[in-house]
Image (cartoon, rainbow, N blue to C red):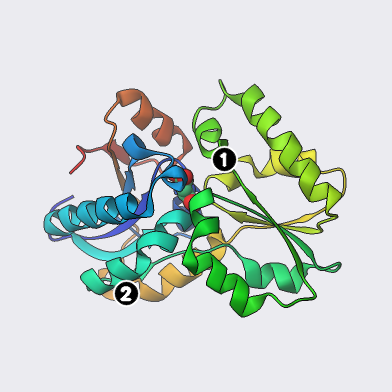
Amino acid sequence: MDQDTPVILVFDSGLGGTTILNHTLARKIRGPFIYVADNKFLPYGQQKKEFIQERVLEIFSKLNQKYTIESAVLACNTVTAYVAEQLRGSFNFPIIGMEPGLKPAIKATKNKNIGILATEGTIKSLRFTSLVDRFVSDEHNLIIIPGVGLVEEIENLPDSAENLLNNLKPKIKQFEDADIDVLVLGCTHYPIIIEQLKSLFSNNIEIIDTSEAVVNELEKFIKTEYSSNNQEVDVMVSDNSNSYYEKIKKVIHSSSIKQIKFI
Ligand code: DGL
């Protein structure tokens, strides 16, 4: 990709953002795309806020020097919670963030018991607490569980399948004991195991995943003057092992993917 071609940046700590990228590709939104995974410091949800802020600002500055960024998707709830505002203040391209889908959950619940599974970072963030303050009334019962360990286990599938199951079971039990009828997925890694999550609940629950909403938002910023059918994806990983790139490559639904050096 040359420096003057406007690119759409999709950023996450690891594999999670591919759930957003794949929705984008399926909707035939044109690229080219750069997918950046900062897997060296994964899981972001267990890192200090200040560290993530500094790290993501530095990565974005370098990317901005190297590329013409048309818009950027923070395909990560944790990054959005910690850095979205600073990024918006520092760069003049549109930055699309994401947050746990509380509003759709409130709409969907019938018994008013809503489960939320998100990273510890997202749950502790001011952005999340203010979201809860704004939209959740006393009649709702929120069961908020941090998905500690899940991101690493999802990253390491299939080897980690047993650990993942052992980690999920008590969490699902807590949700079931609280009789939730809606579960919000507050981390982009979790839709990767959406079928497993569904199968672990004994009752039918509605799962809220905000991937489509993020893509709707991105679509508003796509400039038609650059219109093309380009679905090329350049992938950058910070822990530059070939095996990590191969893993990402397998889950991205594009026939035109190549690895490029981390900035
Ligand atoms: N996928 C990211 C999110 O949506 C974070 C995963 C991590 O903890 O690295 O929050």
Up-down relation of residue 71 to residue 263 (above or below): below
- Looking at numbered disc 2 in the image, what kind of residue is underneath it? Thr
Q: x%, y% of residue 152?
A: 50, 33
Tell me if mark 2 has few (under 14), some (14-19) or many (20+) residues whose alpha carbon lies within 10 angstroms of its own.
few
Q: x%, y% of residue 220?
A: 41, 75
Earlier-in-chain disc, 1 versus 2: 1
- Looking at numbered disc 1 in the image, what kind of residue is underneath it? Val
Residue 91 in sight from this viewpoint: no
Q: Dividing the picture into quarters, in which one does residue 167 lie?
A: top right
Q: In the image shown, does 104 or 138 lie closer to the viewer?
A: 138
Horizontally, is 13 left or right of 238 in the view?
Answer: right
Q: x%, y% of residue 53?
A: 30, 56
Horizontally, is 41 left or right of 93 in the view?
Answer: right
Q: Look at the numbered disc 2 and give the secondary structure of its residue.
A: helix
Residue at the disc numbered 2: 224
Q: Nearer the viewer, mark 1 or mark 2?
A: 1
Residue 65, which numbered label? none
Horizontally, is 122 left or right of 146 in the view?
Answer: left
Residue 182 in sight from this viewpoint: yes
Q: Disc 1, ligand 1: is the CB inside 8 Å?
A: no
Tell me if mark 1 has few (under 14), some (14-19) or many (20+) residues whose alpha carbon lies within 10 angstroms of its own.
some
Horizontally, is 124 left or right of 31 in the view?
Answer: right
* The C terminus: image quadrant: top left
Q: In the image shown, does 79 or 141 lie closer to the viewer?
A: 141
The residue sitting at the top extreme is 159
Q: x%, y% of residue 115?
A: 72, 57
Separation of residues labelled 1 and 2 (CA atoms): 41 Å
Residue at the disc numbered 1: 148
